[in-house]
Image (tube, grey):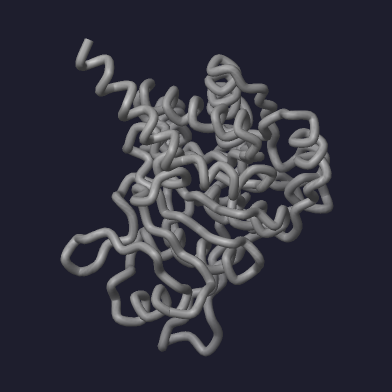
Amino acid sequence: MSLSREAAITTARVLTEALPYIRKFTGRTLVVKFGGNAMEGPELKRSFARDIVLMKLVGINPVVVHGGGPQIGKLLAELGIESSFVDGMRVTDRRTMDVVEMVLGGTVNKEIVTLINHAGGKAVGLTGKDGGLLRARKLRIERRSPELAEPEIVDLGHVGEVERVDVEVIHMLTRSDFIPVIAPIGVDEEGNAYNINADLVAGKVAEALGAEKLLLLTNVAGLLDRDGRVLTGLSTAQVEALIADGTIQGGMLPKIRCALEAVRNGVRAAHIVDGRVDHAVLLEIFTDEGVGTLITDREA
């Protein structure tokens, strides 16, 4: 009986702590990027789905953007199609693009939709092709070399960047109490499909929606200092300083730049969240401590 009472008291404390955050974010839009290692393991996936459903039930409008790099890589290997990367981006020829669309727009998207629906929500799966949601253009990378007078243009194939987001279909769904689940596949004016980095899509969707928050789930505890401690409550100026002094580097750089651009373009706050933690989304939004790094555009 004492254990049950202690559990009840703990639950009451959690709800009390969450109440002001629920009041603050009711009616607001939160864009959550779900991908990478956060998608690995059935319990983490179910935990994520329950978090999204609870957000909707308390009056928040969650919009999910997902990746699926590991799943794409696995299927390419099974089909005997080699993968190559340039600056962390998968070179995507026509055969690879077919697999990307199959995995992102099919397998992964439908799995997330099913998980959310099973948890009591009403999710609808989309790709950037649906309703003209994501207008894309081909991404070209320039590489400079002392030996060349002009930079070398690297062709990544069907890899794109977001040119425009048409939020009409998202608004239609959220107004009807549905939860949009978006696969990061864009289309250009000629109807060509492009594989787009999911973090970049999430950031652009958040900007277009004027979202309260952008949450990027990843497989690290957050933005770390040189001693391995999680940094949070950072301004954009502080983050730029961490980039300049080399504290932020490697694979974290694109994610951080995405967060910076989002908060500079109208998103109130961006969060780098440890997706390996059970109920990471709720802990970051509804508790004082959180489980990741918060970035805002305020002055330090």
Q: Is residue 156 above or below residue 183?
A: below
Where is residue 8 shown, x and y percent of the image? Answer: 33, 22
- Tell me, yes or no, if residue 159 can be seen here: no
Toward the top, the furthest residue is 1
Q: Please state which of residues 70 and 238 is positioned toward the viewer in this rendering.
A: 238
State the quadrant of the C terminus: bottom left
Position of 150 compared to 43: left or right?
Answer: right
State the quadrant of the N terminus: top left
- Tell me, yes or no, if residue 142 can be seen here: yes
Q: Is residue 165 above or below residue 15?
A: below
Q: Kindly identify the residue that appears in the image at 22 percent across and 61 percent down.
A: 229
Q: Kindly identify the residue that appears in the image at 34 percent across and 51 percent down.
A: 289
Where is residue 35 shown, x and y percent of the image? Answer: 46, 39
Q: Please state which of residues 133 and 208 is positioned toward the viewer in this rendering.
A: 208
Where is residue 120 shown, x and y percent of the image? Answer: 59, 17
Position of 220 compared to 183: left or right?
Answer: left
Q: Which of the 4 quarters of the picture holds residue 212?
A: bottom right
Position of 278 compared to 68: left or right?
Answer: left
Position of 200 compared to 88: left or right?
Answer: right
Q: Kindly identify the residue that appears in the image at 42 percent across and 49 percent down.
A: 84
Q: Which of the 4 quarters of the picture holds residue 64?
A: top right
Q: Kindly identify the residue that appears in the image at 71 percent across and 29 percent down.
A: 178
* Picture mark count: 0
Where is residue 68 shown, x and y percent of the image? Answer: 48, 37
Q: Please state which of residues 18 and 145 is positioned toward the viewer in this rendering.
A: 18
Q: Is residue 153 above or below residue 268?
A: below
Q: Is residue 134 above or below residue 98?
A: below
